[in-house]
Image (cartoon, grey):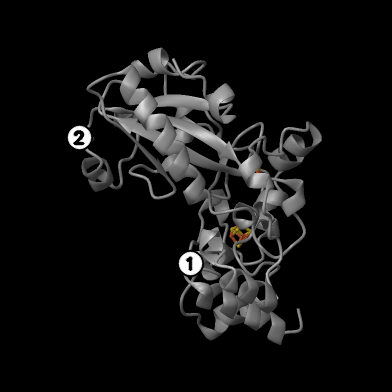
């Protein structure tokens, strides 16, 4: 049996049958050798990433440390063979971010948190500053009980919603959060700062924004974040997300990262240096 807490520092994990999940990208399962036939199950877990050392700059907290995709890749490369050794003949594959299922909905159904009106999963311990990792298999959900120590297994998979206080909607500078939590993904600054081409209006929004990459405003104002901060659980226990922090980007820092060969190891690199560099340039032109 694997103890995710002692092996990897993962404290919250829960299992769910894939029949309870919206499988939006079945081809990802099939490519990984897992049948997407309505059977199978997933182990979902939270990777908290908030660190106080990452606050106060112009980069969203999720991108302040090294690229989380790299972290997840090494994690899955370690966990999946261990699971396959424990259960010979079964196949396990890990995904995070680019996942076969709608992760927020599934994680809420599995009991890892509530669905926030800001579109994010919110856990009691870490609020919404979490990546959702998932390990998928063609085997029944019951196997997780035998494979993982302390895994949460629910009797029913009813998702819960946040308290709906509206603080995120009121604080959103882009007006991207509508009534009852409908998110306008195109207007959200997190998406806008990642766009290859900007309209004149979007350029104006980037010039005014606090961040050159992403946006944390709706997370920071959320009462779940405030409660997690006061109770001392917000800070990630995972050292990867506390190290090599770059919380502020300017032209000189981007140039240094590129010349040191470090740029590609960052989450803000995935659209290329041109996109984040453009955002920095827009803000510098505006005297920020
Ligand atoms: S700020 Fe309020 S409405 Fe928005 S996600 Fe948090 S609890 Fe829900
Ligand atoms: S990330 Fe920023 S722009 Fe997007 S919904 Fe939240 S507050 Fe609004």
- Using the numbered discs, state the Cα–Cα distance from disc 1 to disc 2 in whole angstroms: 33 Å
Which structural element holds mark 2?
loop
Mark 1–mark 2 contact, CB under 8 Å? no
Q: Work out which residue is located at the far right of the displayed protein and give it.
A: 230
Q: Which residue is at a point 72% across and 39% down the rendered structure image?
A: 235
Quarter of the view holding residue 22: top left
Q: Is mark 2 within 8 Å of ligand 1?
A: no
Check disc 1 and report its element: helix, strand or loop: loop
Is 174 on the left-hand or right-hand side of 89? Answer: right
- Residue at x-position 39% and y-position 12%: 146
Residue 226 figure quarter = top right
As drawn, 63 above or below 136: below
Q: Is residue 89 left or right of residue 83?
A: left
Q: Quadrant of the N terminus?
A: top left
Residue 240 screen position, x and y as percent: 62, 44
Along the line of sight, the residue nearer the viewer: 63 or 178:
63
Camera-side residue: 180 or 215? Answer: 215
Compared across the picture, whether 59 is left or right of 273 comes to right
Determine which quarter of the picture holds residue 190: bottom right
Question: Depth check: 43 or 247 in front?
Answer: 247
Q: Earlier in the sequence, mark 1 or mark 2?
A: 2
Image quadrant of ligand 2?
Answer: bottom right
Residue labelled with disc 1: 186
In the picture, the disc for residue 35 is 2
Residue with the most extreme front position: 260
């Amino acid at each position: 049996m694997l103890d995710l807490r002692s092996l990897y520092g993962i404290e919250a994990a829960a299992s769910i049958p894939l029949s309870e999940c919206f499988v939006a990208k079945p081809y990802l399962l099939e490519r990984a050798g897992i049948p997407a036939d309505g059977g199978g199950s997933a182990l979902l877990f939270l990777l908290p990433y908030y660190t106080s050392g990452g606050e106060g700059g112009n980069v969203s907290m999720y991108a302040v440390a090294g690229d989380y995709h790299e972290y997840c890749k090494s994690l899955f490369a370690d966990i999946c063979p261990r699971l396959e050794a424990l259960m010979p003949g079964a196949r396990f594959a890990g995904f995070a971010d680019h996942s076969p299922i709608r992760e927020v909905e599934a994680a809420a159904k599995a009991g890892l948190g509530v669905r926030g009106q800001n579109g994010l999963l919110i856990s009691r311990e870490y609020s919404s500053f979490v990546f959702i990792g998932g390990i998928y298999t063609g085997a029944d959900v019951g196997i997780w009980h035998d494979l993982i120590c302390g895994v949460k297994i629910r009797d029913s998979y009813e998702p819960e919603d946040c308290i709906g206080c509206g603080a995120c909607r009121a604080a959103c500078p882009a007006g991207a959060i509508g009534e009852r939590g409908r998110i306008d993904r195109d207007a959200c600054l997190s998406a806008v700062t990642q766009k290859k081409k900007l309209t004149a209006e979007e350029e104006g929004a980037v010039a005014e924004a606090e961040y050159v990459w992403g946006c944390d405003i709706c997370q920071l104002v959320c009462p779940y974040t405030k409660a997690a901060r006061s109770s001392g659980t917000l800070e990630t226990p995972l050292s990867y997300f506390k190290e090599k922090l770059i919380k502020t980007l300017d032209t000189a820092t981007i140039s240094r990262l590129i010349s040191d060969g470090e740029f590609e190891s960052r989450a803000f690199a995935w659209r290329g240096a041109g996109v984040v560099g453009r955002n920095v340039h827009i803000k510098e032109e505006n005297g920020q």
